[in-house]
Amino acid sequence: MEIKRPTLVLNKTTCLQNIELMADKAQRHKLRFRPHFKTHQSIEIGRWFRNFGVEHITVSSVKMAQYFASDGWKDITIAFPFNIHEVDDLNSLSANTKINIVVDNPITIDLIKDKIENPLDVFIKVSTGYNRVGITSSSYSQIENLLSAINEHPKLTFKGFISHAGHAYEASSRNDIQNIHFDAVMKLNRLKNYFTRRYPDLELSVGDTPSCSISEYFKGIDEIRPGNFIFNDLVQNNLGVCNIDDIAVRMHCPVISKQQNRNEIVIYGGAIHLSKDYIQNIDGKALFGRIIISIDGEKKLLNPKNYLVRLSQEHGIVRLTNKMFKHVEIGNIIEVLPVHSCLTANCMGNFITHKGEHIEMMRS
Amino acid sequence: MEIKRPTLVLNKTTCLQNIELMADKAQRHKLRFRPHFKTHQSIEIGRWFRNFGVEHITVSSVKMAQYFASDGWKDITIAFPFNIHEVDDLNSLSANTKINIVVDNPITIDLIKDKIENPLDVFIKVSTGYNRVGITSSSYSQIENLLSAINEHPKLTFKGFISHAGHAYEASSRNDIQNIHFDAVMKLNRLKNYFTRRYPDLELSVGDTPSCSISEYFKGIDEIRPGNFIFNDLVQNNLGVCNIDDIAVRMHCPVISKQQNRNEIVIYGGAIHLSKDYIQNIDGKALFGRIIISIDGEKKLLNPKNYLVRLSQEHGIVRLTNKMFKHVEIGNIIEVLPVHSCLTANCMGNFITHKGEHIEMMRS
């Protein structure tokens, strides 16, 4: 495969292994596997899931729902508080596709109620501690208000409670993630128990990759919606959620400059390719990517003393140890493990598989 | 103008005013104005510069050079250490367009020397303190080595020294920026004085928006290459380089959720729209954008106690004071002033002018 400029190379085998593990877990726990497709945003990659029996998917925008509906996906949850300005698009979409929307307040429903044309299932978004969107899971009166608004509408059906334990990403250990997930499951079960008499079919849907990857505790849960797991990245690795080998995407970057006095190499590969997400390195500083180089014809992951220390729009600055600096020459192609694969994929807009096949993503 | 989802709205009047100021400054100081087009990456916006007499441009990649050459730009500097893997593309490009490349080492030239088909002007990249790429301006022996490599090649002509004082972005005051720029100009003049006997036509090219916006000192400089100034952003405002009114781009975002207990509103507008660049706010925390809302029918920039505190892939969390929280409702469209307009524009891939015209950008 010829690399001319920053290229996001996808290892399909790794992806398929990652999907297999999650699909197995879902089956083992009798959970509906509704993967989040915002990570890859690709019709082609979406199709890989069909071989694992996946029929239900999650997306993060109406446009993404339109995109995947165009490839025949028939049951799509838009896991984002519904944006009232897209109700016309929602109507076209829900004419032929089962769409589940997410709301966290009755105002949204009030603002769209006269415009909804087709039946929709509605998840109530609850917060189990992440505090981004959603009703705090203990706020029964707010939930009741929202339920009333849903029930009053002839086209809307209350489907259940949906949560995303995004605070699992701030966990300091695998144990911490387990605890956050356990706490979330408990809170959701309390809701299920409380509302089950009135809504015997209500479902519980949870969704982050760290919890879904690590935990084996899914009491009362009906559905999982992880997304990132298909690619993984340094964030997941840093959390102890995946190994380096489980990371399916690498940015291949030409080396364009060597700065001997600083032991730095400069790559063609910057913020517009990788995104500016970072994790904290062992030296306490921001790490924008880890580095794989060829040594004596063999690919080698360098230890974190060698890392991507800075990103400009198109440049990346990699600081290396004395020893490793000697192994890299101008014109070499090095590989960068991305910090946050969802954002990196979104920056790039396409992939090449390690076999050289081009894979397109949704275009905005 | 109907806003349905995150939309980058461009004020053309502000852009034209920003261009006018910089074009005037270039004329006043008898500098060639070679604006960097990586900020807007748009053929249409590029054309606005022609009315100000601009005929020479700067880009940051071979692809960007191809894109603008396709619109008739005839003199293009690729201000990025040349990537040897793109020499074929460079050859096609330089067949019909005057291309100036940038190099900082003789190895690059050695690796492409047998493949160069058309005449090229070559700038030697020097570092005046930013320490990203380039030969340290005092390293005469390295410069001589590179000059030899250039001179040995029949198609290459040494054009001059090019620098980018990116460290001006770390300045703590306007004075600081002036000093950084003055220091860079001094260092470049030392090179000019030293080499002028051998290369009487050698040019000095400088390029960052902070220095070019603030300074009136351009002794010995032949050319300026600022880019960001056409849009400006919170980084520039924070440096004291521009006023809020000089910022030409605003992300218009629907409000999708209100979190009463935290005085937070959640907008449809996240890392994939704005990029994850941030500046430090007055409270010491990361600020991802400042907020403009409508109060009593009038647009109002909120003080920095109200700001974008967090970004997920598609969500933005805006924390507001008690007072301002009451002015924002679900379904409202609020405006976000971006931290780094180049990355924000790159994330979006297109603009709408404040008069509702669509403007396309280069697609990767």
Image: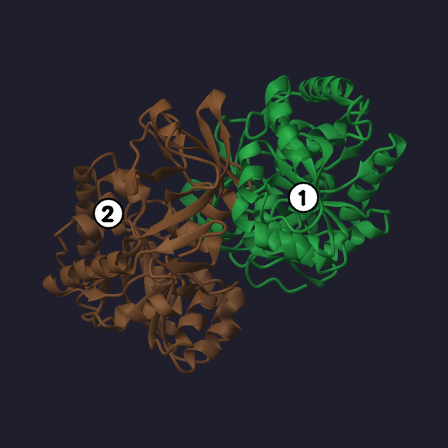
Chain colours: A green, B brown
Q: Are marks 1 and 2 on the same chain?
A: no
Residue B352: image quadrant is bottom left
The residue type indicated by label 2 comes to: Asp
Closest to the observer: A188 or B156?
A188
Identify the residue position indicated by label 2 in the image: B245
Of badges 1 and 2, nearer the viewer stands 2
Q: Position of residue B143 (x, y in %)?
A: 32, 58
Closest to the observer: A263 or A77?
A77
Q: Position of residue B141 (x, y in %)?
A: 32, 55
Q: Position of residue B80 (x, y in %)?
A: 40, 59
Badge 1: chain ID: A
In the picture, measured across the screen, residue A74 lies left or right of residue B38, that is right
Badge 2: chain ID: B
Q: Position of residue B28 (x, y in %)?
A: 10, 62
Marks 1/2: CA distance? Answer: 50 Å
Q: Residue at x 88, y 32 (%)?
A: A30
Q: Give the position of the C terminus of chain A as an image quadrant.
A: bottom right
| Residue A300 numbered tag | 1
Disc 2 on helix, strand or loop?
helix
- Whether residue B237 is visible: yes
In the picture, measured across the screen, residue B93 lies left or right of residue B284, that is right
Q: Is residue A236 above or below residue B49?
A: above
Closest to the observer: B107 or A69?
A69
